Image (tube, grey):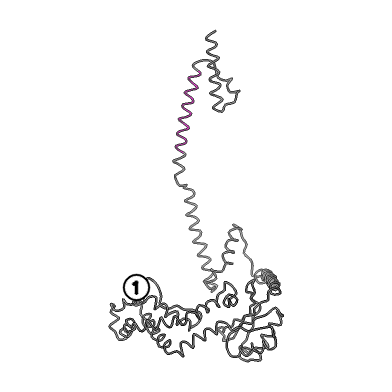
Amino acid sequence: MLSICLKLEDLANKKRHIDSSGLEDDDVDDVELNGDDEETNSSGKRKAKEDEGIASLFKKRTANLPSRQTTINQMMKKELREDVCMQIARFFYTSAILFNCVKNPEFQKMCQLIDKYGIGLNPPSYYEIREKYLKKEVDNTMSLLEEHKVEWRKSRCSFMSDGWTDKKKRSLCNFLMNSPKGTIFFTSLDTSDISKIVDKAFVMLDDIVEQVGENVVQVITDNIANYKAADEMLMQKRKKLFWTPAAHCIDLMLKDFEKKNKLHNKTIVKGRKRTIFIYSMTLLITMLKHFTKGKELIRPTITRFATAYLTLGCLFDNRNALNQWKRSRFAGIRDGKYVERIVIDSRFWASVNSCLRAAYPLIKVFHMVYSDEKPTMGFIYD
């Protein structure tokens, strides 16, 4: 009787152990009531734990090892990218496309959409680009223009002209409309026979304003004599319209600074001779970049007169590095001695500082006018 009680108690203990291990109640019935089975069961559990420990250790080690397949895929993708980029570059070269086109956001969008399509893309044909998609793009542009026209009626707009001369010596002019919604292209004209005659220029500007209607409140053009006279005639006809000269007016002010002010003229001439001499020899350019840590002395900009003052600013900023000139062998030659006298002349640097202080406000406004980030005249007046 005692032995039966002990076996029942042992069975209850085994049942509790099995339940805690996650076994179902039905699994308990398979456990035999003898000591040999208990020993076999316990040894099996020890072996299972050992196997589990080894397996977990193996998993940890293999988790830290790089995937060979991933590495091969990365190498293949890298080689494939080189081939793709080389073909894109070859397309640019053989089609004489400007390299700046890569900076066009539409180029990035095109590459992303090609990648999204995947393998098997059939590129557009000559007919599709010339007819089908061109018409769609024109429709999209006209739809965008309508959105701007809604803004013009609400807050009015500014009419801007941007002229240039092409390789065939033709005078061309783009006309744009600006509003709080942004700037949008409106039309383009060949002004070769128009821009130099006041009456014709007036008729051209008046016709474009007529197309937009009374929503135009400001006309922005160059400050050259014929456009100035045409804009005055336009303001006489349209009393609610006013004319604003563009950056050309500021450029003419910088021109007057350089040509009519003796201090500015003398200082700019000295600075120009100095930069011309340095940039005329490869060894001097190498020395310059070494002592200025890669900085240039010439700052090209949109107009020649602004460039002159920006170059003076670069000379002034790097004046300490330019003092190394005295140690070079070029300081002994005839032109080098002239440059050395300029470098060590404290009066020259005082003149540079005076010129920069006078021209800086104009150059600051000049850059604001040429900014494409937001409409300029509003925040300049503010």
Q: Is residue 167 left or right of residue 271?
A: right
Q: Is residue 44 magenta?
A: yes
Give the position of the N terminus as an image quadrant.
top right
Q: In this orientation, which residue lies closer to the viewer: 354 or 302? A: 354
Read off the residue under disc 1: 291
Q: Is residue 24 above or below residue 237?
A: above
Overall secondary structure of the magenta stretch? helix
x 52%, y 15%: residue: 34
x 42%, y 82%: residue: 354
Among the 4 quarters of the image, the one containing residue 275: bottom left
Range covered by the magenta-colored residues: 37-58
Q: Is residue 1 above or below residue 157?
A: above
Q: Is residue 115 above or below residue 308?
A: above
In x, y percent, where is residue 267?
40, 85
Q: Is residue 255 magenta?
A: no
Q: In this orientation, which residue lies closer to the viewer: 16 or 25? A: 16
Q: Amino acid at mark 1?
A: Phe
Among the 4 quarters of the image, the one containing residue 333: bottom left
In x, y percent, where is residue 313?
42, 78
Judged from the image, the secondary structure of the residue bearing numbered disc 1 is: helix
Residue farthest to the front, as pictured: 382
x 66%, y 72%: residue: 130
Among the 4 quarters of the image, the one containing residue 298: bottom left
